[in-house]
Image (cartoon, rainbow, N blue to C red):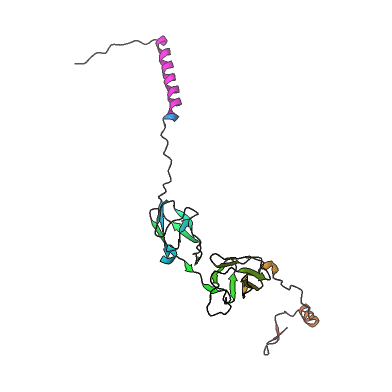
Amino acid sequence: MYRVLPYFRTTKRDLIPHALLVVWRLLLSCTLAPALMLVPAQSATLSIPGAVRVVIQPPEAVSDGARWSVNGAPLQSSGAVLTNVAPGTYQVSFNNLPAWLEPELEATQVIGGTQTDVTATYRRLPRLYFRAVPAQRASAGATLEFLVHTDDPGDPQNPGAGASLVVTASPAPAGSLALDNASGRFTYSPAAADRLPFVVTLRTAQGVQGTFEVTPLNVRPAEDIVIDVAPRPVDPGRAAKVSAGFPENVCANKAMKLCL
């Protein structure tokens, strides 16, 4: 059986509210549509930290207090692991010990999710009697360092252990030169102006002294190198032949290889 639906008659007066409803819904959809659009999530940068472990040699330097640091952070003991380090390049530095020459700064690459292992070696400074120091050479950008002492039984003028020394240099270098009597550590760092050898004198209060020569090994600046660019005199005969049409690089006698 079929169901008969009732018939509703629509007049023009009924169409006006209906049309307004359609227009309102259209405006509503246009206003809210941009707000309802899905915005893709921004890609986040994921940084996985790494770790750095430094082992210092020899054990004697570690016993004397050798430590290491990354980018000036607090000092770490030998074998310690510095964790949660962002990936990148870092400078590993080492503390200064009186009787040891610390390792140079070392650039270390840290990779996320891995541990970077570094081995560094301290070198014991040479210990020399102040009256028997051999001639020294100091390279630019480096520091000359060694220990001096005042006790040598083989020297009749031996002043004995622990004697204080006064250091002088002639001619006086521009670079930093010093002697720490507490540790006996002598240091000299060449300056750019230091190019000539000079004599260092170590003297006790009683006048006992020792001397040695230091030669700075500085590279001469390019602006100080004089190049002679004066024009060379021209041979009149040669100039006449060139002006007459003879090439300057043609040999006058090919057998003898005599060229103009």
Seen at 40% across and 11% down, the residue is: 14
- Examine the image and state in which quarter residue 6 appears: top left
Question: Would residue 233 be counted in the magenta stretch?
Answer: no
| Residue 43: x %, y % from top left | 42, 43
Q: Is residue 235 shown left or right of residue 181?
A: right
Which of 256/142 is in front? 142
Figure quadrant of the N terminus: top left
Mainly helix, strand or loop, the magenta region?
helix
Whether residue 222 is visible to the viewer of this picture, yes or no, is: yes
Which of 94/100 is in front? 100
Question: Would residue 10 be counted in the magenta stretch?
Answer: yes
Residue 211 vertical position relative to residue 12 in the rendered view, above or below: below
| Residue 151: x %, y % from top left | 53, 74
Which of 170/9 is in front? 170
- Examine the image and state in which quarter residue 10 appears: top left
Whether residue 119 is visible to the viewer of this picture, yes or no, is: no
| Residue 163: x %, y % from top left | 57, 69
Residues drawn in magenta: 9-33
| Residue 65: x %, y % from top left | 45, 61
Figure quadrant of the C terminus: bottom right
Seen at 79% across and 81% down, the residue is: 235
- Examine the image and state in which quarter residue 130 appears: bottom right
